[in-house]
Image (cartoon, coloured by chain):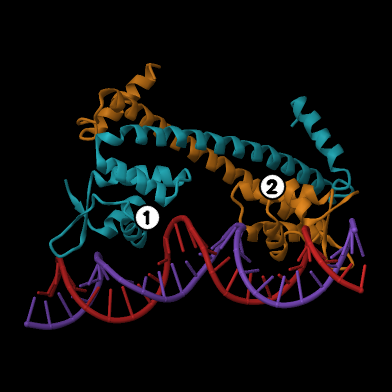
Chain colours: A cyan, B orange, C red, D purple
DNA sequence: CCTTGACTTAAAGTGAACTTTAGATTGTAT
DNA sequence: ATACAATCTAAAGTTCACTTTAAGTCAAGG
């Protein structure tokens, strides 16, 4: 049950001191205590809140939506469904994101292959001219497991 | 070899007219032609450029970096290595992003499970109090394939 | 020729997520 | 007690990726 200053909290979370203050100003950290003099004191349990915030943030949830979630948490048991639904929706969003990234990865792999050919030949020489044919060749090679 | 007006190009790409103009102003579309009167004319091949731009953008590359890539393309064969390296780096970044998203997904799945329990019981009742023990139970259930 | 709708540029505005600044206060070490 | 680092708040500034506005130009139909 130790207390942490804002700079210690920053170090523990990898956020900056001003980011923590900003999050608090946006209502994301209503649970953080203060000393009699007004300085923030972070408790051990606060870091699990920060970990959830970090998870949501790094999976693309806006500050506003995270605040909504925190507000629901503070409201108590009447918001359990909303909170569950939030995570269900977020699961879908993250899965869609992963799918999109995986599609991008395929295009990127094609480009790497394309540029490796070109670097080996020292020139793009006409490759760009009939890109469709080139992509078809790449697809064929992939299908055959040659790349 | 048809020509497309900016609004037709917008429709084909799903971007807005002003986004296309913005991209051009940032140097992303140096290949787009103009009529004698100064209006943009998009060619069929321009859309494969736009498709690469879209791929890079949606995998998190900044406009500035995309411009760098386009500049390299315009420079010719002397930049083949840089372009290959860009895609190799980008592959790593996207793979890291996917890995992070997958980790987030695990946390989100835990939260869904957590809130389903709570909704069923109608209360969080002490769940938050000993979160560690609860997470351990979740881990055990997962290991046993029960969730 | 003239109207009308789509196009043009340059510049200002927007929203998100911080970051920086300025000036005041707090806590601690000597 | 005093110095000094760390903290505080409020407000302004920054960056990114657009979007909107204003004022003007182009192109096709009647």
Question: Which chain is home to disc 2?
Answer: B
Q: Read off the residue under disc 2.
A: B14
Question: Which chain is home to disc 1?
Answer: A
Query: In this picture, is B51 found above or below A95?
Result: below
Q: Read off the residue under disc 1.
A: A15
Q: At x 61% / y 46%, what residue is drawn?
A: B59
Residue A66 image position (x, y, % from top left): 38, 46
Q: At x 41% / y 30%, what residue is drawn?
A: B109
Query: In this picture, is A91 found above or below B57?
Result: above
Q: Are marks 1 and 2 on the same chain?
A: no
Q: Secondary structure at mark 1?
A: loop
Residue B23 image position (x, y, % from top left): 69, 60
Task: Please indicate whether residue B131 sits to the left or right of residue C28 in the image.
Answer: right
Task: Please indicate whether residue A5 sits to the left or right of residue A128 in the image.
Answer: left
Q: Is residue B51 visible?
A: no
Task: Please indicate whether residue D27 sits to the left or right of residue B81 in the image.
Answer: right
Q: Nearer the viewer, residue B80 or A76?
A: A76
Q: Residues within 10 Å of mark 1 (few under 14, many from 20)?
A: some
């Amino acid at each position: 049950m130790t207390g942490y200053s804002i700079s210690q909290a920053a170090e523990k979370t990898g956020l900056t001191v001003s980011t923590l203050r900003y999050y608090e100003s946006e209502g994301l950290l209503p649970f953080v205590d203060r000393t009699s003099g007004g300085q923030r004191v972070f408790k051990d349990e606060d870091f699990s809140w920060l970990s959830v915030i970090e998870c949501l943030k790094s999976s693309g949830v806006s500050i506003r939506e995270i605040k909504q979630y925190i507000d629901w948490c503070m409201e108590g048991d009447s918001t359990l469904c909303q909170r569950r639904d939030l995570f269900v929706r977020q699961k879908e969003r993250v899965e869609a994101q992963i799918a999109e990234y995986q599609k991008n990865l395929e295009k990127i792999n094609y480009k790497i292959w394309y540029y490796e050919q070109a670097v080996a030949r020292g020139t793009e020489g006409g490759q760009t001219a009939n890109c469709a044919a080139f992509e078809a060749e790449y697809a064929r090679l992939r299908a055959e497991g040659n790349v």
